[in-house]
Image (tube, grey):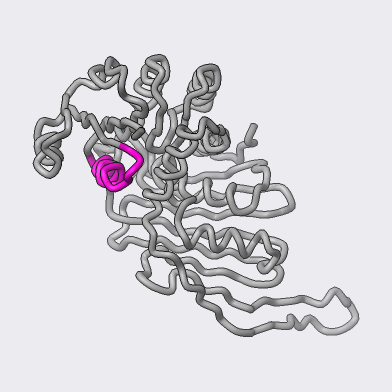
Amino acid sequence: MKLKVGVIGLGYWGPNFVRNFIRYERTQLVWVCDISEKALKKTCQGYPYLKSTQNYHDLLKDNSLDLIIITTPPNSHYIIAKKALEAKKHVIVAKPLALSSKGANDLLKLANENNLLLHTDLTYLYTAAVRTIKNLIDKGAVGNPLYYDSIRTNLGLIQQDVNVIWDLAIHDLSIIDYWFNLKPEKVFAVASKHNENSKTEEMAHISVTYQNHFIAHIHVSWLSPVKIRTTLVGGTNKMVYFDDLQPDEKIKIYDKGVKIASDSITPFKPAYRSGNIITPTLSQEEALFLEIRDTTNQIMRKSINYLNAQLSIRILKILEACDKSIKTGHSTAIR
């Protein structure tokens, strides 16, 4: 039996869910929903057998529907997800899960009580590059992790209900949690608005301090003339460079480092190490398809876990601390 699915929101990301659910042989896409009649027509031209509506409540009333995908603006995520869970539907939500950690906790409690999937779309965690680097870290190839340094910029998509940190830094925060499993302790964030009509900050720099003296620096922007998706990871053994925009050679592993002698007698002289550069071959499977396969298998096998939802709540607490840091101009502890 196929899992019956509906997608709410056909803007930037929703059509990718539509395409992948149609591609997956274990699911049947039944409904698409958007307030834009133009978006509905565009989608249904390619798939005329789909049911379409401008009212998401039509999906909630369909008792045959198993799973609802929510890719609407962030300020609507909580209320639509809550109504879907109350209608006994499994739910996948575009990032962020909600606009507060309290709201996300409420959704998790509701999902858990009804044994329903609650999953935030953190697609990066299913990419071959991110999983390959995770494997390197777990095997100890990088050594003790020291830092994470990321640039994530492009021109747009500017949003009005969340700032650039809530839009772009979620990717980095989810990757850091997945790779290192370290507890965040405090954050310092600086953000700015450069358009007089903007309601939210369009550029930001974030420093997150984790346990074991690990630190993450994240720069995000909606106002860059070039799209950049680069990450550097430094460890005591090796360094890893990840450029997600490269069609090939996304990852380069550098056998490089520096050691400073602790002997106070001899003159200061750092010892540099420069070894080989390795570029691993990566799978070309689409990450969103792998995410869909994973989540739908949880539903079909009745083996739902809430690790993703718990991760989303941890991320939301860091985002809330970022907002507080921006407002106060000081470092903020992460609770």
Q: Which quadrant of the figure has residue 255?
A: bottom right
Rendered residue at 31%/53% (across/down): 223
Residue at the front extreme of this rendering: 1
Q: Looking at the image, is 319 positioned above or below residue 113?
A: below
Quadrant placement of the C terminus: top right
The location of residue 116, given as percent across then percent down, is 48, 24
Rendered residue at 61%/61% (across/down): 135
Is residue 15 on the magenta stretch?
yes
Residue at the right extreme of this rendering: 265
Rendered residue at 36%/29% (across/down): 67
Total numbered badges shown on the rendered structure:
0
The location of residue 55, given as percent across then percent down, is 20, 20
Range covered by the magenta-colored residues: 11-27
Residue 158 in sight from this viewpoint: no
Q: Which quadrant of the figure has residue 184?
A: top right
- Compare residues 149 and 29 and report the one nearer the observer: 29
Say left or right for 240 vs 158: right
- Compare residues 297 and 334 and report the one nearer the observer: 297
Is residue 125 on the magenta stretch?
no
Rendered residue at 45%/63% (across/down): 230
Say left or right for 246 vs 178: left
Quadrant placement of the N terminus: top left
Q: Looking at the image, is 222 positioned above or below residue 146?
A: above
Say left or right for 247 vs 120: left
The location of residue 276, given as percent across then percent down, is 60, 84
Residue 270 in sight from this viewpoint: yes
Q: Looking at the image, is 31 positioned above or below residue 178?
A: above
The location of residue 7, given as percent across then percent down, is 28, 33
